[in-house]
Image (cartoon, rainbow, N blue to C red):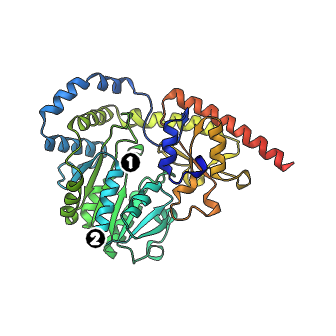
Amino acid sequence: MTQLAKTLTEIEMQGIDSQYNMADGHAYQDLSVSQSAIIEKLPEIWKQSASKKQHDTERDFLFQFSKLAKSSSIHTYKHFRICPTASNSIDIVAAYFKATGKCVALIEPTFDNLFLILKRRSVPLVSVPESVIYEGDLDTLLPLCIDAFFLVNPNNPTGKLLSEIRFKTIVHWCATHKKMLILDSTFRFFYPQSYDQFQLLLDSDISFISIEDTGKVWPTQDLKASLLIFSEDISDLMHTIYEEIYLCVSNFQLEILISFMQNTENIGLETAVWREVEQRRLAFRKTIESSIFEIHKSATESNISVEWVTFDPRLGNDFQMMCVFKNEGLVVLPGRLFYWNSSNHPGHQQFIRFSLLKPRAQFDASLTCISQAINVVQDSFLEVMK
């Protein structure tokens, strides 16, 4: 069944029902003491949310998000909507592309649901390798036939992040060539917010959309919200599309998420998020150290909550490796499906993605599964090499 899976989400669904799961990148780590206090106040939050107008709660959500993102430029910004999930936000963006007939350049590798949602809306797509975005010559390597440039920052699965200088270069390129810029920033809060990207976008006068998310960061049992922020020139159509699909996201849901963001602001992202991720990353990397697996060179500096691992092609491919892990009770993701335009390339079938933010007991047990799988594969490889 695993080998027949056609999408990453299909495999993530298998992981949800499995004994051990390092497939989906959602936040399921244990609540901290201060986060547990938020849950104890749910009756109070319920009453507060019931007494507030929807508009006021949405504004409060945007304001708290902008403080945590250190983006004062959008504290009172008008052009935004809130979706239940990031996938919903992506679908609205895809509907906008379909309505306007835009051709879109999309980063590769990246999570395949971006491609699948755009494809279902019949949006023309061009693949752009990750290397172009972070270090390539944009004038030489980006096709001018495109209308919009869709990138993920930091990127999933590698965790690569645009520096301020590189971000300015991309914005300038879009301004010079009259291209639209779309940013999926759903892993934003795993890195220090060192510059205000929204201010740079607003100053540039380019058309833009930014997709944000809370589901990757806080352990709220998949209760989440996705902020869509867009430039004024496209706001009428974006609002129209949103209102054809949604009325609003629950006030109660937003108030809970506001409380989690406020808690994080009070104690700091390092304490609330980064420290936990780093401890798990160190434990994971120690588990695969000096084994058949290694962190791919593109992901060695990653700070996001997943690990992008590669292995010798003589050991087999990613689907075969998934089966080894599944036999040990652990579900992980195959690398090829992140290469939405080139999954058949043999060089793109030597990756596995592991997620880190699982309950501590499950995470520790998953490391044991990984150790056992490593032994199985290494023993088989030695037997073949005799």
Foreground pick, 137 / 248: 248
Q: Amino acid at mark 2?
A: Thr
In screen coordinates, is 263 left or right of 371?
A: left
- Residue displayed at 61% across by 64% down: 345
Is the residue 163 above or below the residue 354 in the image?
A: below
* Residue 32, label in figure: none
- Residue displayed at 19% across by 59% down: 240
Is residue 197 among what the camera can see? no
Q: Residue 142's x, y, as percent?
A: 44, 73
Q: Amino acid at mark 1?
A: Arg
In screen coordinates, is 301 left or right of 82?
A: right
| Residue at mark 2 | 100
Q: Residue 30's x, y, as percent?
A: 43, 28
| Residue at mark 1 | 188
Q: Please tell me which of labels 1 and 2 falls first in the chain.
A: 2
Is residue 370 among what the camera can see? yes
Foreground pick, 143 / 241: 241
- SS type, badge 2: helix
- SS type, badge 1: helix
